[in-house]
Structures are given as structure tokens and as C-alpha cells.
Image: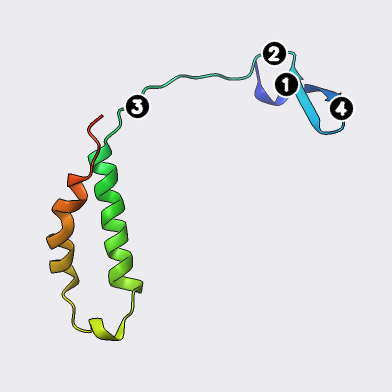
Amino acid sequence: MQLDTIKPKLKARGTKRLKLQYDEPLLSYAFKSKLRRYGEWMQMYNDAMRNMRDAFYDPNMHGVDWPAVTEQYRPLAGAHTPLR
């Protein structure tokens, strides 16, 4: 079966919906994924801290050691990771 030969049949239902029906089944697939929530939270934390370092400006925060601040709060980001 080649994908470019599949042509849908259009059936209008009312004025708001349009349903596509195909003569042949479309491709289907299944996959499994393992959630790594700790890694996701750490990635979000790293992205947020990088944004703070590169784009945040406050006149009272000149000279802040952003790498030290990042390491100081890193354990807190991992502590809020749900373990379900």
C-alpha cells in the first residue's frame, strides 16, 4: 500500500462537521515510553535558570553569581518531583 494512493471520501454532516472516511486503513503504530519525571523537572529547572541568567534584568541584581544560585536551588527542584 502506498500512502499517496489513499484517497479519502468526504461526507458532510450538517454545516459544521466534515468526516473523512478512507477505503484503506491508515498507518497505525504503538509505542511504549518510560516517564522520567525527575529528568523532566531538571530540564525545566535548567531552562528556567538559563532564561533567568540570560534574559532577566533587575538593577538590584548586578553581580549575582548565577551558577552558584542555580546550584543552590537545584535540590529544591528535584524535591518536588512526583514519584507516581
Coloring applied to the structure: rainbow
Q: Is residue 31 left or right of residue 26?
A: left
Vertical comparison of 17 with 21: above or below? below
Q: Earlier in the sequence, mark 1 or mark 2?
A: 1
Of tags 3 and 1, the one toward the viewer is 3
- Disc 3 residue type? Ser
Whether the residues at callouts 3 and 2 have beta carbons within 8 Å, the answer is no
Q: Is residue 56 above or below residue 62?
A: above
Q: Is residue 61 left or right of residue 51?
A: left
Q: Quadrant of residue 45 in the image?
A: bottom left
Amino acid type assigned to the residue bearing label 1 in the image: Ile
Disc nearest the viewer among 4 and 2? 4
Q: Are marks 1 and 2 in contact (CB under 8 Å)?
A: yes
Examine the image and state in which quarter residue 74 appears: bottom left
Q: Which residue is mark 2?
A: 24
Marks 4 and 2 in Cβ contact (< 8 Å): no
Task: Give the mark nearer the N terminus: 3 vs 2.
Answer: 2
**Gap in angstroms between the C-alphas marked 3 and 2:** 28 Å
Q: Secondary structure at mark 1?
A: loop
Q: Secondary structure at mark 3?
A: loop
| Position of residue 5 in the picture relative to residue 45 (left or right) | right
Q: Is residue 54 left or right of residue 71?
A: right
Residue annotated with mark 1: 6
Image point 50% across, 19% down: which residue? 29
Q: Which comes sooner in the sequence, label 1 or label 4?
A: 1
The residue to which callout 3 is attached is: 33
The kind of secondary structure element at disc 4 is: loop
Identify the residue position indicated by label 4 in the image: 14
